[in-house]
Image: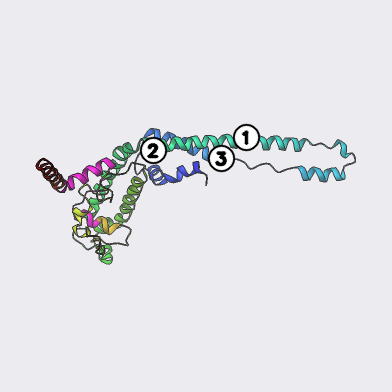
Amino acid sequence: MTQPARAAVRYAALFEPADAGEWTLPQDVQTARATHTRILNAIRNHPPAPPDPHETLVLTALTADDPGRLDIGPLLNHQRATAERDHRLRVLQTALERAAYDLTDAVRDGADHIITDHLTPALTKLWVEIKKNVEALGTRDPSDVTGMLRAPDKTRLAFLKLDELAARYSRLREAWSRIPVGSCEHDVRGEHAEFEPGIYALWPEGKRVSHLPPAAPPWPTGDGGKGRLIWLVRAGAVPWLPTPTQRDQAWRTANAEALKNMADQQRRHHAVHGWGKQSA
């Protein structure tokens, strides 16, 4: 796969669900993508080179009464058609490279806009639907699949619907993760990537010192994410799709006391150090 063609693959997680109506995209991104797709399709669907008539003409010459007057028009036409095809493909390849750069620039330049004005509204709407279906389960244990399937229609249908909603939630977070944004200065471990207060505000046991083995998550696993969504809703979680700036601000808020203590300690250190210099 050529580098320009990879642009469509790189952002497939962002584009394909948008095609299905799961979220919107900025107009300039849609325009750049349409241009890239149109040129890429022109290259993929370009007709193959015509067959070379050289060998056919050789066989004709072998049986011709007057081979010196052999009509080589088909050979000249083939050379002209092949040259025309090659030139067209070179032009299209150059156009595809430029379209790929334009598409990448459109996504990169509009990264924050895509997150805040397109993906975030989709998440807000999706989470309302997820909460509604989780609340329809009542206090039933989602691991009791048999019991869920035998429950009243409202509960049973809500339980089944959560498979689709979990897949949509996963696609939304995957799309967010593919957007080329800058790195975080503070939230380098991604503690605030999914929830503004941080994952450990919901799961304090998960924050362990490095020499201890990781704690097992409190939500079910291996069910496509449905069990985790149910656990999150029941825990009162509200996910978000932040920019790096928003993540860093959330990190500073969560660590405000520790940062203040550190700053106070540094001021005391400087004060003592300065007093020592004066005494000397």
Residues 132 and 122: in front is: 122
Q: Residues within 10 Å of mark 2 (few under 14, many from 20)?
A: many
What kind of residue is marked 3?
Ile
| Residue 110 on image: x %, y % | 35, 36
Predominant SS of the magenta segment: helix
| Residue 239 drawn in magenta | yes
Residue 80 picture quarter: top right
Percent position of residue 277, x then y: 13, 42
The stretch of residues the image draws in magenta is 230-258
- The amino acid type found where label 1 is placed reads His
- Give the labeled residue for mark 3: 43
Secondary structure of the residue carrying tag 2 is: helix
Q: Amino acid at mark 2?
A: Val
Residue found at the very far front of the displayed protein: 280
Check disc 1 and report its element: helix, strand or loop.
helix
Pick the residue in front: 259 or 26: 259
Q: Position of residue 73 (x, y in %)?
A: 77, 35
* Residue denoted by label 2: 107
**Residue at point 31%, 50% (across, down):** 169
Q: Is residue 262 visible?
A: yes
Q: For the C terminus, which image quadrant?
A: top left
Kindly identify the residue that appears in the image at 28 percent across and 63 percent down.
149
Residue name at image x 34 percent, y 53 percent: 167
Q: CA distance from mark 2 to mark 1?
A: 31 Å
Outermost residue on the right side: it is: 65
Q: Is residue 154 visible?
A: no
* For residue 191, side relative to residue 76 (left or right): left
